[in-house]
Image: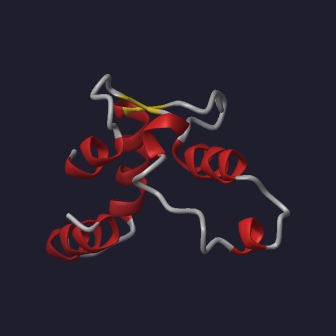
């Protein structure tokens, strides 16, 4: 939930492109640098990775975020390692 709260800047329980601005920097993304994708397109791709497969609406709810990480955690043997990975990945 710490990671979700960090991304949900408005605190409304939904992560949107507007929430990501200032939290997720696309400036070093290769497709942004070469002009292939805009900042908003990269944000949308990022959000789609967490979004429900049948409901790619560009908004990620707490439930969708937690479901994504339930799948990730199932592939990691140790809860301690999962927590460490989350803290490192999200700079918590």
User: At 27% across and 66% down in the image, what residue appears?
Assistant: 86
Residue at (67% x, 52% y) in the render: 39
Q: Is residue 49 above or below residue 52?
A: below
Q: Is residue 20 left or right of residue 44?
A: left
Q: Is residue 60 left or right of residue 80?
A: right
Q: Residue furthest right?
A: 36
Q: Nearer the viewer, residue 82 or 91?
A: 91
x, y percent for residue 80: 14, 73
Instruction: Choose top left, top right, bottom left or bottom right for residue 10.
Output: top left
Is residue 79 or residue 56 the one in the foreground?
56
Query: Is residue 23 found left or right of 87 in the rendered image?
Result: right
Percent of width and height locating residue 38: 75, 53
Which residue is most to the top? 12
Q: Is residue 86 above or below residue 5?
A: below
Q: Quadrant of the C terminus?
A: bottom left
Rendering quarter of residue 67: top left
Q: Residue at x 34, y 70 (%)?
A: 89
- Residue occupying image coordinates x 37% and y 53%: 69
Direction left: furthest residue: 80
Counting from the top left corner in percent of width and height, residue 82 is at: 25, 69
Q: Which quarter of the rendered picture does the N terminus lie within?
A: top left
Q: How is the image coloured?
A: secondary structure
Q: Position of residue 27 (x, y in %)?
A: 60, 68
The mark tally for this picture is 0
């Amino acid at each position: 939930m710490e990671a979700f709260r960090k991304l949900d800047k408005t605190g409304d329980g939904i992560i949107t492109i507007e929430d990501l601005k200032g939290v997720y920097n696309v400036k070093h993304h290769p497709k942004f640098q070469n002009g292939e994708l805009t900042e908003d397109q990269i944000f949308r791709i990022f959000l789609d990775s967490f979004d429900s497969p049948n409901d790619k609406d560009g908004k990620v709810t707490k439930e969708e975020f937690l479901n994504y990480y339930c799948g990730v955690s199932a592939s990691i043997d140790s809860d301690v390692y999962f927590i460490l990975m989350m803290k490192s990945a999200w700079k918590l």
